[in-house]
Image (spheres, helix red, strand yellow):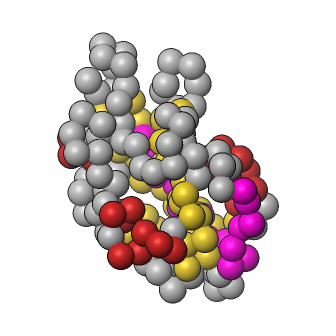
Amino acid sequence: MPLNLISPAFADGERIPEKYTRDGANLSPPLKWSGAPEGTKSFVLAVEDPDAPNGTFCHWGLFNIPADQDQLPESVETGPEKARLRIAGNDFGNTHYDGPEPPKGHGTHHYHFRLAALDVPDINLPSQVGVADLWKEASKHKLDEAEIVGIYER
């Protein structure tokens, strides 16, 4: 069974509820996955908007997610798991989740939540690493990848 990623908050290809955007509460949405391949030792997650006016915009990056984990609760960064999360810097310049905030009138943007199963227990990167560099490093260890796309328009 291939790696599968879902969100209880929105279906693949559907609108991301406002509370998970910068127009709302800016909470990270809940995510669940299944089908991790044999040999998975950790996971990495990246959220990107390829429809941004200046090219792909990175909203969130989590890494060193333990292999025995199969979900992230809503607003994971404010919960008890916060202490063990490694978070990459996003293109807003923050090291936390920043949800959709496309330019008004720019049309529908597609937010790609990408989860990769890795063959290493951790990725040793500096704390200021960006999401794009995180994904590049993680790709060297990728066993499988799953994606869910949410849309949002202002």
Viewer-nearest residue: 98 or 53? 98
Q: Is residue 3 left or right of residue 122?
A: left
Viewer-nearest residue: 26 or 15? 26
Q: Residue 99: x and y, percent? A: 36, 42
Q: Is residue 87 left or right of residue 75?
A: right
Name the residue located 35 percent from the left edge and 30 percent from the top edge.
101
Q: Residue furthest right?
A: 140
Q: Residue 120: x and y, percent? A: 73, 76
Name the residue located 72 percent from the left edge and 56 percent from the top edge.
126
| Relative to 88, residue 83 above or below | below
Residue 114 in view (yes/no): yes
Name the residue located 54 percent from the left edge and 37 percent from the top edge.
93
Q: Residue 63: x and y, percent? A: 59, 64
Name the residue located 51 percent from the left edge and 86 percent from the top edge.
68
Magenta segment, which residues?
111-126
Viewer-nearest residue: 147 or 98? 98
Q: Is residue 69 magenta?
A: no
